[in-house]
Amino acid sequence: MNLNKLLIYEIIPQETPYVIRNCSKCKRNTEFYCSEKFRVNANQKIVDIWLIYNCLHCEETWNYPIISRVNVNKIDSLEHQKFMNNDLETIWQYAFQINQLRKLCHDVNTDIRYELRKDMLDSTSDGITIKIRCKYDFGLRVDKFIAEIFNISRSKVNKMVQDDMFLLNPDISVKKKIIDDLQVTVIGDWYKAML
């Protein structure tokens, strides 16, 4: 049973990742941003759905294929309505499909701005456990996150991990990307002056 104080950090992206691909107007690889709009094209009962991206420099468009040549009856009606209404949450789910986007583009720039929202649950314990909530995967590494919240270097975080000053649940490397509901238990009381 964990009696530590529980700090919950929610990682909230402030933008979607840029994709890097060839722009036919710019004649080079350039960044495209998510327009936050779907394009839905129906030919009788067959539907195609794309997420529209625009070149950062010239506004040329690229359509990220979401659904191709599918019978409209095969698409959940609620999901279809989200596509038709440009539902922002649905758009962001597709805009954060980093692995899929990398298959179709030169690269994906995941170095995006994000906000940290912190909540603390009351406890009389001196120890702390940090629970990380991260709805969208954009490749933020555990060591970078820990370094940011404690205002220490990543090399210091890695040294502290070697000295067993952090316990991760599930047990993953701090060099891996953050997963939703990851818990980091801090061993010792060195952190008190930092939080």
Image (tube, rainbow, N blue to C red):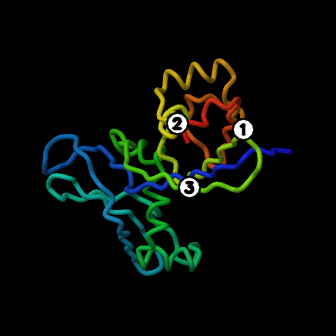
The label on residue 51 is: none
Image point 62% across, 52% down: which residue?
8
Q: Quadrant of the C terminus?
A: top right
Mark 2 sits on what residue?
A: 150
* Residue 95 percent location from the top left of the image: 43, 56
Q: Which residue is mark 1?
A: 169
- Tell me what residue is drawn at x 45 percent, y 73 percent: 87
Q: CA distance from mark 2 to mark 1?
A: 19 Å
Dot label at residue 135: 3
| Residue 159 falls in image quadrant | top right
Q: Amino acid at mark 3?
A: Lys
Residue lying farthest right?
1
Within 10 Å of disc 3 (Cα), the crowding (few <14, some 14-19, many 20+) is some
Front one among 60 and 152: 152
Q: Position of residue 131 (x, y in %)?
A: 65, 47
Q: Amino acid at mark 2?
A: Phe
Observer-nearest residue: 5 or 64? 5
Which dot, 1 or 3, sits closer to the camera?
1
Pointers 2 and 3 in contact (CB under 8 A)?
Answer: no
Badge 1 element: strand
Q: Secondary structure at mark 3?
A: loop
Tell me the SS state at disc 2.
Answer: helix
Task: Name which of mark 2 and mark 3 comes first in the sequence.
Answer: 3
Q: Is residue 137 above or below residue 177?
A: below
